[in-house]
Amino acid sequence: MIKGVFFDIDDTLYNSTVLARMARRNSVQAMIDAGLPIRDEEKVYRALLRVIRRLGPNHSRHYDELLKDLGVPWSPKIVAAGVVAYEHTKAGYLKPFPGVVPTLLELRKDYRLGVISNGLAIKQWEKLIWMGIHHLFDLVATSEELGSEKPGEEIFRYAVRRLGLKPAECVMVGDRLDTDILGARRCGMRTILVRRGKGPKAREADATVGAVTEVPRVLKRFSRG
Amino acid sequence: MIKGVFFDIDDTLYNSTVLARMARRNSVQAMIDAGLPIRDEEKVYRALLRVIRRLGPNHSRHYDELLKDLGVPWSPKIVAAGVVAYEHTKAGYLKPFPGVVPTLLELRKDYRLGVISNGLAIKQWEKLIWMGIHHLFDLVATSEELGSEKPGEEIFRYAVRRLGLKPAECVMVGDRLDTDILGARRCGMRTILVRRGKGPKAREADATVGAVTEVPRVLKRFSRG
């Protein structure tokens, strides 16, 4: 009997990949518009990706570092142009995938809902709040607060326990095999892989869907099976 | 002969007072909505103002500090709710005062334009870029970059010199007597006080206006006088 459903955030509830790509593209264009002396957009974009890879996605000074890497003197105008373009893009793209909100509302009638997310607690909460879906979850567990991240079992066990459930009564929904699916599976939860694009079904997941909107149907199947 | 016109940013080009008030009010409401156990909005708002006074307006952790002051355990949900409410309010209120953009476009035909602003360089640039007016100025001087702030003469002299002008050829437009007007006056510039509300005219300024839209008319008078 399934009683709890947990979701990953990035690329499960909203299109994190497209947001990041568009925001970075737009910030590069804005920096060039603000006077960046290197006007080859591809070159600057690739340099920005290298900075993000080196410093991690949550570092606060990607654009300052980018100027250093490009050998360009520090300019508050250029850095600010990148920041503002990122924020404006976020405002346009940080939206739940189509159908996510009605699906969560439907699921709330029959299941307790939670989030299990790797990342900085405030950043991950900001995404839920920005999308206006923070009240839909009974629990949000972030790796920063737990000091333990997916695919480690601890964060899954913590989330399940906090809802007063057992792993076998819970389902994890996420887009990543290596973190969401394998971690939840090891801890005894059922798993639904949200697959983007054309990849093959994953044998490791109990079910594979194309979008969160298909989750209620799969849960009914789990309950019958 | 007036050749250069310099502007303050906050409360001169946009309504910084209303933005700050609305953003803080909205962030308090959002934190209460997100579960802040103290539900007296006035009490929380006053506590927030005390935090901002203590840490300064540019500190990055006002809401964390607010929870401490209120004796509430740290909560990423509550902090993130405050941050997101602030950002959403900014998106609605960070707009030039009515008529500012056409006025700047008109002035650009006859004068060189600049900004002289106390504050963090990136923060002040972000405001100009967010409002889409950053290309309208020939120079932006911030106190952080200069290591010298209004009303000290150095930042005014620097800005004037950078445009290749003399102080007597320049006008400073700002809302604050103590910084914008007195500093510019000491350095030999003419001054226009932008007065909000009902206060008396200031004898210390060469002219007092109710909005930036009146500046072109005053400049014509200066040229005749």
Image: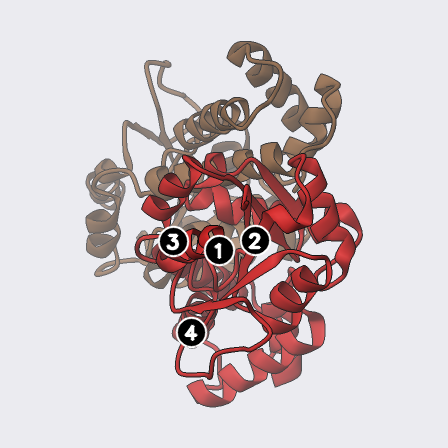
Chain colours: A red, B brown
Q: Which residue is mark 2?
A: A171
- Same chain under badges 1 and 4? The reply is yes
Separation of residues labelled 4 and 2 (CA atoms): 19 Å
Q: Which residue is mark 3?
A: A96
Separation of residues labelled 1 and 4 (CA atoms): 22 Å
Q: Helix, strand or loop at disc 3? A: loop
- Same chain under badges 4 and 2? The reply is yes
Up/down of B146 relative to B13, above or below: below
The chain identifier of the residue carrying mark 4 reads: A
Q: Name the amino acid type tagged 4.
A: Arg
At which x and y percent is residue A167? Answer: 67, 49
Residue B24 shows in the view: yes
Observer-side mark, 1 or 2, equals 1
Return the residue nearer the eye: A34 or A172.
Answer: A172
Separation of residues labelled 1 and 2 (CA atoms): 10 Å
Up/down of A3 relative to A92, above or below: above
Return the residue nearer the eye: B1 or B121.
Answer: B121
Q: Name the amino acid type tagged 1.
A: Phe
Q: Which residue is mark 1?
A: A222
The chain identifier of the residue carrying mark 2 reads: A
- Same chain under badges 2 and 3? The reply is yes
Q: Which residue is mark 4?
A: A196
Q: Is there CB contact under 8 Å for labels 1 and 2? A: yes
Observer-side mark, 1 or 4, equals 1
Instruction: Report crowding for label 4: few under 14, some 14 to 19, many 20 or more residues within 10 A (C-alpha).
Output: few
Observer-side mark, 3 or 4, equals 4
Observer-side mark, 4 or 2, equals 2
Q: Earlier in the sequence, mark 1 or mark 2?
A: 2
